Image (cartoon, helix red, strand yellow):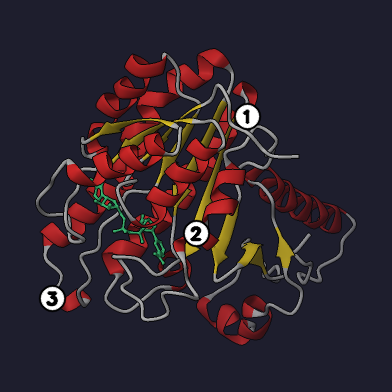
Amino acid sequence: MALRFDNKVAIVTGAGGGLGRTYAIELAKRGCKVVVNDLGGDRHGSAGSTSMADKVVGEIKAAGGQAVANYNSVEEGDKIVKTAIDAWGRIDIVINNAGILRDTSFVNMKEVDWDLIFKVHVKGAYSVTKAAWPYMRDQKYGRIVVTSSNAAVYGNFGQVNYSAAKHALIGFSNSLALEGAKYNILSNAVIPTAGSRLTQTFMVDALKPEYVTPLVCYMVHDSFKDSGKLFEAGAQWYGTLQYYRGEGKVLQNATVETIHDNWKAVSSMDKPKHVASIAEQSAMLMDMLGSLEAEKSSGGSSGGASAGG
Ligand code: NAI
């Protein structure tokens, strides 16, 4: 069964090239009405032109799809959402994809390198999503994607600014998922790997942006029900990435020396456990405190209970 997007309206930011262009084209091919946002700057965030967004809108229309261009920076999310509302009266899907790089070692990083990265990636996703949110709440329907990066998860040399901003987006999406749940607004993050203007990779064929497209388009489909998750796509591989924590150890009245002496247990990942929510994390802590209390009142003093749940 073909997965269609008829009667749905999407904003894809930074859709004038690279990954965003492929999302816009694929969604439109499946009946979605698409705002193709791109301010048309260079990969460092300078300059701007309308031609990138116009070109993609032209491609979509030539193939029989529906699209309008928007040239605002993602920092002006209200204007981008207004483009969708003016054209079609609703907004169902926001794919926060626009991005730039200001790579430099930390020692050489200027404040402008830090600020610009946070403006485009974090403030941009905030601004567009914030403007779309009231519409999504009212219609009790929304699909949001933010674009993170392997640099966020693992760190990357020369990308202190970028990896910090990309990690911020994971927290942003996870909390939005909780606030959106009762309004049927789902929010998820994607980590793409693709040869594009930003990566300028030599493995262009193996890392086609088109290999990321099906996952991201599925993540904003009606039938998609996950929220607050992190998915990966690249080189025709698709998967999920989650946080795990070690079993740990309860060390009552610990000193610096106690931590030192128990470092093997504290830092061990021999028994990893996925914690799905802050509620589960708190429940584990309460359980552990409960068993300590029980132990105390029964006169026990092992101090070695596990906090791993
Ligand atoms: P790209 O440079 O080909 O596309 C990014 C687009 O965003 C450009 O068309 C650019 O004009 C637009 N843009 C930049 N600043 C904007 C702003 N303020 N307002 C509106 N549009 C703006 O890059 P690519 O590779 O397609 O990246 C897309 C997203 O995926 C970015 O967020 C990037 O950080 C992320 N990403 C990409 C990876 C890859 O392997 N290509 C890896 C990890 C993350």
> In x, y percent, where is residue 221?
62, 37
Q: Which residue is mark 1?
A: 181
Viewport quadrant of the N terminus:
top right
Three-letter residue code for mark 2: Glu
- In front of the other: label 2 or label 3? 2
Ligand 1 quadrant in view: bottom left
- CA distance for labels 1 and 2: 30 Å
Instruction: Judge left or right: residue 122 versus residue 254.
Output: left
Q: Of the residues under marks 1 and 2, which one precedes in the sequence? A: 1
Q: Residue 134's quadrant in the figure?
A: top left
> In x, y percent, where is residue 223?
70, 35
- In front of the other: label 1 or label 2? 2
Q: Quick check: 287 above or below 124?
A: below
Q: Of the residues under marks 2 and 3, which one precedes in the sequence? A: 3
The foreground one among 278 and 119 is 119
Q: Quick check: 205 above or below 129?
A: below
The foreground one among 271 and 250 is 271
Q: Which residue is mark 3?
A: 108
Q: Residue at x 63, y 41 (%)?
A: 227
* Residue contact between numbered discs 1 and 2, judged by CB atoms under 8 Å: no
Q: Which residue is mark 2?
A: 210
Viewport quadrant of the C terminus:
bottom right
The foreground one among 222 and 296 is 222
| CA neighbours of label 2 inside 10 A, class few (<14), some (14 to 19), many (20+) | some
Q: Residue at x 58, y 78 (%)?
A: 259
| CA neighbours of label 1 inside 10 A, class few (<14), some (14 to 19), many (20+) | some
